[in-house]
Image (cartoon, rainbow, N blue to C red):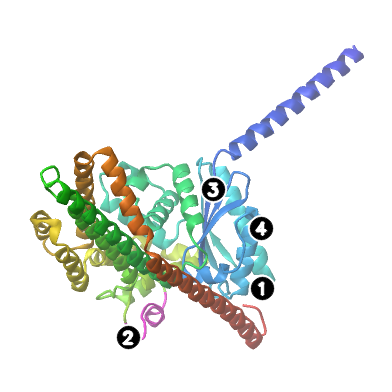
Amino acid sequence: MRKISVITAVFLTMALICTVFVGCLNTDKKAEESKTYVGIDINPSVNLVIGKDGKVESVEAANEDAQVMLYGEVIVGKTAEEAFELIAQLAVDCGYLTEENSGVNVTVVAGDGSAEAEAKVADVVEASFKAEADKADISVNINTDAGFSLSRKLEYAKGKYPNVSAVQNMTAGKFKLVTELVANDEGITFEYAASLDNEDLIEKLNECYNKIEPYATEAYNLAVAQANEAFEIAKTTAGGVAWTAYYAKLMALNVFEHSVNYGAIYAAYDIAAVSVDYTLDVIELTLDYADKALSNVDTQKIADILGVEKSEVDAAVADENGKITLESLEAYIDKTIKNMSAEAYNQIKEEIPELEAYINGFQAEVDEYINSLPEEYATQIRNILADVKDLGSDVFEFVNSLGDLTIDDVRSLVTYLEQKRDETMQKIEEDLTAEELEEANTYVQAAKDMLTSAQTIYNTAIESARKDAEEFLAQAKEGRFEWKYQHGQQNGQQE
């Protein structure tokens, strides 16, 4: 009996070990099914994608402060814990995380939607920041709920898309993924992004983040857009001239077989489409929509809801000329709320919806501004079309039907021009033999390849923009360290 019991015990133990082992494998497998998105907002704002192996696959410095803080640092390839510890350390060392600005908003979204996995990652972020804050005698406040501006924008989006179920059912975490993707991929619309699941959104964001250069400041992006515009228009023009010349040669040889210069028509549409499209890119980079001055802001109302003095709100949200923007308003409200104690927040919690509704009114004002097209750019676009004589009356009729041009109208115009260009190419393919088409394409490519001067100018512009951006970020980061040292020396402590 004892022998049987021992044997039985051995088998039971083995079975238990196998069960636990298999269970661990299953747990590990489940944990490896998807990637995880982590957003950390102090300000600075940093976004990361954590891979299935627990290591950082990509990182985005979401604003200039974050670009300064992360400049020269290696985040990708580190474990999530190593990355969070480094970000926390930099936030303290660069003087962004201080006793006066000790609130940290954390957003974690697991691709598979696992609340348990999200909670574990959030715990690691919190532990990392508290450890670094303790070293600097800072009482850090970690908030994993949606911050004020994120929550407000989500409710605003739901009001804007009342009949889109994907938007109505959206969580704050998914909304952040959607808005991040739309901001980083100009080819994706809000409604399309909303239709994707978390796993797809995170994967697409991962691809976008990996394409971002660490020195991609606003000034750098504008310089690149302008260089791209000049180079692409030069190539398109060279190709257009080649198409026109090739067709002119065919028509000279046999005007009855080739009675229409489709090459010239194609070139006209192509040049116009590229020119207008790049003009739109420059417009969107040049116009600072966040800089739109708001009218009739009742700072007393905001002060009353937040339980602070009106003078404090005025000093924080208005610039030296008294101008208040939506960005400055939300930055102040976010900072104030995330730095509140739980007790202080509970006292104003019931009034937050009223504050959200009030700020939504200004969002509508900014939305209208965003879609407006300054007359100087409308004139520039009309001049592009007027310069291309072969477009025909249909294009001008299309433009005139739009009335006062808006940003959305310009997007429609680009689509229209590209459609007409593609239709003309179909006519070319029908008009030419296979041999002629091959000869034409070779002719056009040769013309583009001869643009050595334009290529040199482009390369020089990009390199100059990169150097300027890196120099700016390096100096700004050095300045943050110097400020922190001097500030800490003056106060006898590290802040």
Marks 4/1: CA–CA distance: 19 Å
Q: Which residues are magenta?
A: 308-322
- Asked whether the residues under the numbered discs 2 and 1 touch, taking CB atoms below 8 Å apart as contact, a structural biologist would say no
Question: Which of the marked residues, 3 or 2, is nearer the chain's N terminus?
Answer: 3
Label 1, on which residue? 136
- Asked which quadrant contains residue 329, the reply is bottom left
> What's the amino acid at mark 2?
Asn
Label 3, on which residue? 36
- Asked whether the residues under the numbered discs 1 and 3 touch, taking CB atoms below 8 Å apart as contact, a structural biologist would say no
Marks 4/2: CA–CA distance: 43 Å
> What's the amino acid at mark 3?
Thr
Marks 3/2: CA–CA distance: 43 Å
Marks 1/3: CA–CA distance: 29 Å
- Asked whether the residues under the numbered discs 4 and 3 touch, taking CB atoms below 8 Å apart as contact, a structural biologist would say no
| 193 and 175: which is toward the camera | 193
| Residue 321 disc label | 2
